[in-house]
Amino acid sequence: MARIELRDVAKRYGSVEVLRNIDLEIQDGEFIVLVGPSGCGKSTLLRMVAGLEPISSGDFLIDGERMNDVRPRDRDIAMVFQSYALYPHMDVARNMGFSMEIRKDPVAERKSKVAQAAETLGLSNLTDRLPKALSGGQRQRVAMGRAIIRDPQAFLFDEPLSNLDAALRVEMRLEIARLHQKLSATMIYVTHDQVEALTLADRIVVLNGGDIQQVGSPLELYERPANKFVAQFIGSPTMNVVPVIGTDTGVTAGNGAAIELPDQPLTAQAKELGVRPEHIDVVDNGTGDLSAVADVVEHLGSDTNIYVNVEGIGSMMVRKHGNIPVNSGEQLGLRIQTENAHLFADDGTALRPVA
Amino acid sequence: MSAVKNPNPALIVGKYAALAFYLIFALFPLYWLLKIGLTPDALIYSEGTRLFPSEITFSNFTTVIFQTDFVAYFRNSLVVSLGAAFFTTLFAAGAGYAFSRFVFAGKRIIIALMLVTQMFPLLMIIAPIYKIVAELGLLNSLTSLIVVYTAFNIPFATFLMQSFFDGIPKDLEDAAMMDGCSRFQALCKVVFPLTLPGLGATLGFVFTAAWSELLFALMLISKNDAMTFPVGLLTFVSKFSVDWGQMMAAGVLALIPSCLFFIFIQRYLVQGLTSGAVKG
C-alpha cells in the first residue's frame, strides 16, 4: 500500500518534451486511470513510475520518500504489460513465482503462494503449461498472477486488456475491479478506452499532448469537463460541439437560432456550445430550440440514436432512451437541456456557472 | 464431407520425385568423395567414372589416419575453428545486444564501419595482415588464425546476433526487472535462454567458415605442425602426382566434425522458442 506523488514531473527525449508539469497525488489504495489518445504520454508516465524510464525533471515520491533514482527492482511495484511479457521458456508456475525465485524466498513458501494465486485466478490446472499453450485470456491471468504474488506496494497496468476480444475484455475488467476490492492496493491503470476508465477508476487522469487536462472522478469528468478536449473524450457517443456567438441571455447558433441558457452565466464569452447526445430532447417540428432533419436513425432497442442535420450548423447526434418512433427524413424539433449544456471559451476551456 | 481434400496422387509422386532429385543433386559430390575414398588406388583411373567401384578398400582411410599428419591437422583445425567460433560469438553477442537495446553516441558510425569492412575483397588485405602477424611474431601459430578469423567474422556475426536480440521483446527484460532482476540478471535468466538458437546459429556459421578457410591458413602457416586441415589437404598433392584416394578419404573424415557439430546445435536452432511470450 502506498501513497504516490508526482511533483512537476517532466519527460524529455533530447529537445522533445513528451510530458510536462505533471502534478498528481495518488492516495493509498486508490484506483487511478490514466486515459488519453495514443501518443499522449500515458504509457511513458506509467513507465516512469515503474522506473523503466528515467524522469527528466521533477520529483517522484512513494510514501513521502523520493524515488527518482531508485531502480525498478527496489521500488516494490508490480506491472502488468500490454503484451503480457510472459517468460516463454518458463511454465506458468515459474512465471508467477519468478519474483520470489529472484528474491531467493524459500521454495515451500513460493510453491504455496503460486498455488494460492493460481487458485484465485482459476489457473490451478495450467501451472505446468508453457505460455505458448495458453489462450489470450489465460496469459492475461498469468501476467496478473505474477503481479499479485509479490504483494507489492502498488500495481501498474499498461493497457492490459487491449489484446483481448470484446467479451473477454468485459470479463477481465470485472476481475480487475474485484482484485482491487480484495487487495485494496494502489493501482495505476493506463488505457485509451474510456469505458474501462469510467468503470474502473476512483479518479481519472485525462492526458493529451503531454499535459494533464483534468483529474477527477468519472462523474465529475462527465458532468463538469474542464475543457473541450475532456468533454469530447469522455462520454460515448461523443458530445456535440457547435460554434455559437455568446449573448447576454444565451447563445446564437450559426443559423441564427437563439438558445436561451438561464443556467449558464458568462455567456458573452462563449464561443462554442457543447451538448451530449443524451441531453437533447426530440420535440414536435417547429417547437424547441432548433429544427432539424433526421438523417440516419439507429434503433438499438434500449436506445435510439438519431443523426440529424441542423440547417446552418451541420450534423449532430441525439440519443434517447427506449424506442423513439422517428424515421429518417422526418422533420424534428430539438430542445437542448440547458442545465446540462456546456459552454467553451475561445481557448477551449469550459465556462462554469458561478456557484 | 471432410474439410481437407484428399490430395491428387500424381501430385504426391511429383512432390517426392522433386525432393529426390534435389537430394541426389545435392548429395552426389559427397557420394563421389566417399566413393573415391573407398576405391583402391589401382582402380581409380581405370574405373574413374563408374558409379560403384568393383572393389572396396579402407586402406586409404587407415593410411590417412595412421601414416600421415592428418590427425595433427585435424586437431589444429578443431582448435582454430572452436576458438574462432567461441570468441566471435562471445564478442558478437555483446555487440549485438548493445546495438539492439541501447542508444549510444557513434552507434550509426560503428555500424557503418562494420558494414564497410565487409566490402573489401580478401585479397586486398592479405599482405597487410601478413605483415601485422609477422611483426607480432605470430606466424605459424594457431593463435594468429584464431585472431584473424575472429576479426573477420565479428561484423557479420554481430548483425546476426543483433537480429536475434531484436526478435526478443524488450517487454520481457522490463518485466524481469520489475520482478526484481538487475539488468544483468534479466540478461542471464530471461534473454540468454531465448537467444540459444541465435548463439547456436552463430557458432555453427563461424565454425564452418573457419573449418574450411584456406587463404589465410595458407599465407600465415607454413610449418607442418601448425597446418590446419584445408592446408594439410594440399600435402596430398605432390610434384608429380595427386594421391586422390587418400585426399578424398581425408575429406570424408573432415566432414565428420561439421556433421557432429550441427547435430549438436540443431536442437537450439529450432524456431518458435519465443512464441507465447507476447500476444499472438
Image (tube, helix red, strand yellow):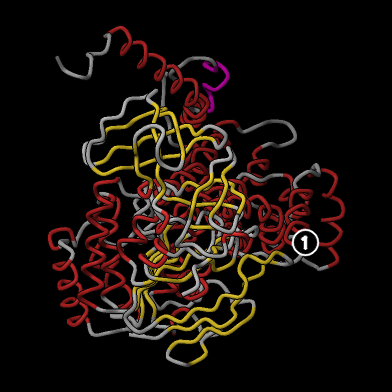
Residue at which label 1 appears: B139
Please tell me whether residue A163 is drawn above or below residue B179 in the rendered image.
Answer: above
Q: Quadrant of residue A332?
A: top left
> Is residue A246 something that shows in the picture?
yes
Q: Which of A208 and B216 is in front in this view?
A: A208
Q: In this view, does A235 lie to the left or right of A274?
A: left
Q: Quadrant of residue A98?
A: bottom left
Type of amino acid under label 1: Leu
Quadrant location of the N terminus of chain B?
A: top left
Residue A240 drawn at (x, y percent): 47, 46
* Residue reaching furthest to the bottom: A64
Write down the chain letter for disc 1.
B
Please tell me whether residue A100 is drawn above or below residue B48 in the rendered image.
Answer: below
* Mark 1, other Cα within 10 Å: few <14 / some 14–19 / many ≥20: many
> Is residue B273 something that shows in the picture?
no
Please tell me whether residue A66 is drawn above or below residue A319 in the rendered image.
Answer: below
Residue A148 drawn at (x, y percent): 27, 73
State the predominant SS element of the stretch in magenta. loop
Residue at x 34%, y 30% (from the top left corner):
A297
Q: Nearer the viewer, residue A116 or B45?
A: A116
Q: In this view, does A354 lie to the left or right of B222?
A: left
Residue A194 drawn at (x, y percent): 39, 56
Q: In this view, does A259 lie to the left or right of B264?
A: right
Q: In which quarter of the image is residue A328?
A: top left
Residue at x 49%, y 23% (from the top left corner):
B28
Total marks placed: 1
Reply yes or no: does residue A335 show up in magenta.
no
Please tell me whether residue B217 is drawn above or below residue B54 in the rendered image.
Answer: below
In the image, which residues are magenta?
B41-48
Q: Is residue A273 left or right of residue A218?
A: right
SS for dot 1: loop
Residue A167 drawn at (x, y percent): 24, 47
